[in-house]
Every structure is written in structure tokens, then in C-alpha cells.
Image (cartoon, coloured by chain):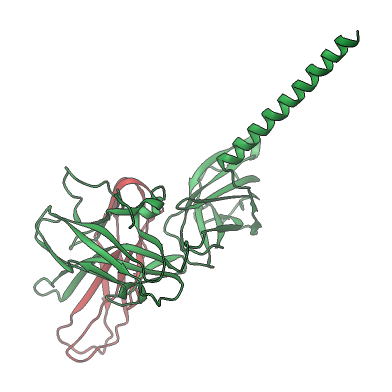
């Protein structure tokens, strides 16, 4: 079982500006039951899914929850306006 | 006709505001749903009833032209009605991870898979069954293929945020296509390395090679024995999450207790995937500071199967009986001549 954060498609009208860096940090992970979660690390997001949280051991019924921090750094030459993004979170 | 039975299975959960996952769940009847959206596999083939992987994932060996039907249950543990989209999409195994492809990306196995219904409207705490049907075309080429059946919810951006959240949870598909039974699974533990990380914690890195014909989801444990002053310790679990594709080789890690002395130790590693189990040994000494020792070639241990043990016991008993009869006859002979 791994959780994967994938992708921000960021669109500005018809332009797709190059974004310097998009990062995901799960922060503190709260658990119930028997599950060991290593401390979260900052993951750079792209259009390819990447693992953001993965347990080291699990036993029986348990849960893990977290409130991720997303950071988008815009280049200094970005055009002012409204930008939209999508974050996909997958668990399988 | 395949016989199916209800199975307790893995459930995974995502809430729309924060991601959250539950890694295993019982069938959930009669108690509130875990928070978020949940999914579990209901049916597993009777031929794989003892295989824990077959209760979490859709795993099967299918001949071209075969059709299978499996049920999954989707549960809404959120406080709002959820509009859930059900679909199959591609997946692949690389660098030790099983990864679902982005969005609705298709491959062969996902194009053979349909869900009924394709969307659900679930009230809070409501559950629904979804049928997953895989129809393998008669001209499908042999080999193992991967996919995921996803349950997906989309949360539109809050006013002024501009960020759409798509959360999905899925059941993995591992389908081996070919005539006759599916190929056997096997693995080899090739080497072990003693490591001390930057914080001084001892770890063991073991290299595992998938030598069989199916993908493997690795678990297992490491024990240390014959240490300083005859110490023994463990078992310590292998870090989870490593999936090995056919022919792939990846490292798995075991984190040990900080108190473990440097050694030397006799390390015994057992690696499992479903019903497959392989054990190997190596003599390891941990470096006194951060760093890694040399990779030590692991010696495989013979597979201890119950029938081998019973065979040995029966053979020993027979030999003892023969020896006893021989002694008795000699004694009688001696008495006869005296």
C-alpha cells in the first residue's frame, strides 16, 4: 500500500508557465493501530506520480492521516492573473 | 465456473481535505466506516484462499478468452454525499514500487476491465458493491500485466483557492495471461550488507532478485544470532512497500534496534510474498560509525516443508525399528546357541 501524490496541472488561460518547483510535504502523520510511519520528506511533484507516504510496517487494522503542505514557487517573470491547479492523491 | 467466497480485505481511505489511509480493515459491517472513502475486495478465488495477497488485490492466472468477475465494496465514511467515479487504469512496477499511472491512462489490462456501475452516489456511511469484470481477449499475448481499479472523488476548489483535489483509492490487479496454470513465483536473497545510518542506527540492506514468473510484494523479517556473548535478537520486520517485477532486483531494508552491538552476527533473513517463503543467512558486522560494510553473499537455507520433517521422522523411526529387531534377533540367536 503506497500513497502517491501526483501532478499539479497549472493553467493560466492558454499559457502553461514553467513553474520552478512544486513540493509536497505530508508533515506530521497521525496513526491508530499498529503501523510505523517514517518521518515525512519533501517530495518534488511532477506529472509523474511519486510516492509521498509509505509505512515501514503494518499489522491488522490501522489508519494514518496527515495534512500535507503544498508549495508552488513561481518564477519571477510569471504573468499576473488567476492560476488553477489539480492535486491527485492515490492509494492502492 | 470459478468459486468465489467473501473475503476480508484491505481497505484504503482518503478524505477530501487531508489524505488519510487505513491499511487493513475487516468487512466493516455493524460499525461506523473509517473516516474518508474506503474500498475493499470482497471476492478471492478459492484456489488462492490461503494467500493473503489474493485477499487484498485481484491476483489471477488467466487463459486467453477467460472472463472473471470480482466484487469490490466502496464505503463513504465522510459527512457528505460522495459522487464516486469507478474505473480501471494502467499500473507498472519499477524501482521496487507498484505505481498507478496518472489519471485514466490505459494499458491492455485496464482496457479489458469494466466496472458496473461506473459511478456511484453514496450517502454518508453508505456502502455499495461494484462488479469488476475482466474479459481477456482470445488473442491476448502471454505475460503478467498490472492495473488498478480506482474509486475516485473530485473536490472542486474552495472559493479563491484555485486548487482542485482528486482523491482516489484502488485495488491492484496482477493478471498473469497464458494457457495452463500461472507460472510459479520464486525469489533469491543474493546478498546482505550491514549499515549504520547518519544517526548511528544499525540497518541491514538485503538484495532480493525475483527469479519467478510473477510479481512479488515483499514482506519478512531478520533475526540476529551467534552475536557477542552468544546474544540473539529479533525478529525485525522488513520495511514494507517493495514490489518486485519479474526479473527485477531491488534492495529491501531492515531497521534494527540502536542497542544492537556491532557483532559479528549470524543474520537470518526470511522474505515472503503471499505463500512464497525463502530464507538465507550471512555473517555480518556493523560498522562502528556511519557507513556501509561489504555486501556479503547470502547462503540460502533449504525450504523446510512439513512433509520433509515428517519424512525425516518416519525414516528415523523405521531405522530405529530395524536396529531394534536386529538386536533382538541376535540376542535370541545368542540364547539359542548357549
**In the rendering, what colour is chain B?**
green
Specify whether residue B291 is in view: no
- Residue at figure coordinates x 30%, y 49% from the top left: B7
Q: Quadrant of the C terminus of chain B?
A: top right
Q: Is residue B34 above or below residue B122?
A: above
User: Residue B12: x and y, percent?
Assistant: 27, 56
Judge whether B289 appears above or below B156 on screen: above
In this view, A56 is above or below B90: above
Which residue occupies the extreme top position in the image? Answer: B338
Residue B238 screen position, x and y as percent: 48, 52
**Residue B2 left/right relative to B197:** left
Q: Is residue A53 left or right of residue B232?
A: left
Question: Does the image show residue A84?
Answer: yes
**In front of the other: A39 or B68:** B68
Q: Nearer the viewer, residue B208 or B194?
A: B208
Which of the chains is red?
A
Residue B174 versus residue B240: which sits nearer the camera? B174
Q: Which image quadrant is residue B39 in?
A: bottom left
Quarter of the picture holding the N terminus of chain B? bottom left
Disc tally is 0
**Rendering coords of residue B54 (x, y %):** 38, 54
Looking at the image, which residue sits at the far bottom?
A14
For image coordinates 25% across by 80% down, the residue present is A9
Q: Is residue B72 left or right of residue B306?
A: left
Q: Position of residue B316 (x, y in %)?
A: 69, 31
- Side of A46 where B186 appears, left or right: right
Amino acid at each position: 500500500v503506497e500513497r502517491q501524490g501526483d501532478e499539479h496541472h497549472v493553467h493560466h488561460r492558454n499559457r502553461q508557465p514553467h513553474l520552478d518547483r512544486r513540493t509536497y510535504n505530508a508533515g506530521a502523520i497521525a496513526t491508530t493501530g499498529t503501523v510505523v510511519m517514517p518521518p515525512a520528506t519533501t517530495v518534488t511533484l511532477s506529472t509523474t506520480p511519486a510516492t509521498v507516504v509509505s509505512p515501514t510496517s503494518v499489522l491488522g487494522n490501522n489508519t494514518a492521516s496527515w495534512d500535507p503542505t503544498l508549495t508552488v514557487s513561481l518564477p519571477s517573470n510569471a504573468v499576473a492573473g488567476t492560476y488553477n491547479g489539480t492535486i491527485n492523491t492515490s492509494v492502492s | 465456473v470459478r468459486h468465489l467466497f467473501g473475503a476480508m480485505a484491505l481497505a484504503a481511505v482518503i478524505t477530501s481535505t487531508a489524505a488519510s489511509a487505513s491499511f487493513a480493515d475487516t468487512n466493516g459491517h455493524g460499525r461506523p466506516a473509517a473516516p474518508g472513502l474506503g474500498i475493499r475486495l470482497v471476492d478471492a478465488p478459492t484456489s488462492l484462499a490461503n494467500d493473503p495477497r489474493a485477499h487484498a488485490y485481484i491476483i489471477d492466472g488467466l487463459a486467453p478468452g477467460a472472463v472473471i468477475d470480482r466484487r469490490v465494496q466502496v464505503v463513504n465514511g465522510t459527512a457528505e454525499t460522495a459522487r464516486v467515479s469507478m474505473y480501471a487504469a494502467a499500473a507498472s512496477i519499477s524501482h521496487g514500487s507498484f505505481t498507478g499511472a496518472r489519471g485514466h491512462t490505459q494499458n491492455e489490462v485496464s482496457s479489458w476491465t469494466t466496472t458496473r456501475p461506473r459511478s456511484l452516489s453514496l450517502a454518508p456511511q453508505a456502502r455499495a458493491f461494484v462488479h469488476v469484470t475482466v474479459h481477456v481477449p482470445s488473442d491476448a499475448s502471454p505475460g503478467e500485466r498490472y492495473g488498478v481499479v480506482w474509486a475516485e472523488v473530485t473536490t472542486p476548489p474552495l472559493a479563491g483557492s484555485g486548487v482542485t483535489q482528486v482523491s482516489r483509492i484502488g485495488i491492484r490487479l496482477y493478471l498473469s495471461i497464458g494457457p495452463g496454470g500461472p507460472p510459479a513465483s520464486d525469489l533469491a536473497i543474493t546478498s546482505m550488507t550491514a549499515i549504520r545510518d547518519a544517526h548511528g542506527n544499525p540497518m541491514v540492506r538485503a538484495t532480493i532478485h525475483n527469479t519467478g514468473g510473477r510479481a512479488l510484494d515483499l514482506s519478512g523479517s531478520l533475526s540476529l544470532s551467534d552475536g557477542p556473548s552468544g546474544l540473539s535478537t529479533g525478529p525485525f520486520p522488513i520495511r514494507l512497500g517493495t514490489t518486485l517485477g519479474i526479473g527485477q532486483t531491488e534492495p529491501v531494508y531492515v531497521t534494527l534496534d540502536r542497542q544492537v552491538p556491532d557483532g559479528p552476527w549470524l543474520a537470518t533473513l526470511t522474505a515472503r510474498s503471499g505463500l512464497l517463503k525463502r530464507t538465507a543467512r550471512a555473517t555480518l558486522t556493523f560498522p562502528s560509525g556511519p557507513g556501509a560494510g561489504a555486501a556479503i553473499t547470502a547462503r540460502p537455507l533449504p525450504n523446510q516443508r512439513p512433509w520433509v520433517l515428517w519424512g525425516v521422522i518416519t525414516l528415523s523411526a523405521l531405522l530405529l525399528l530395524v536396529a531394534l529387531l536386529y538386536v533382538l534377533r541376535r540376542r535370541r540367536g545368542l540364547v539359542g546357541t548357549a
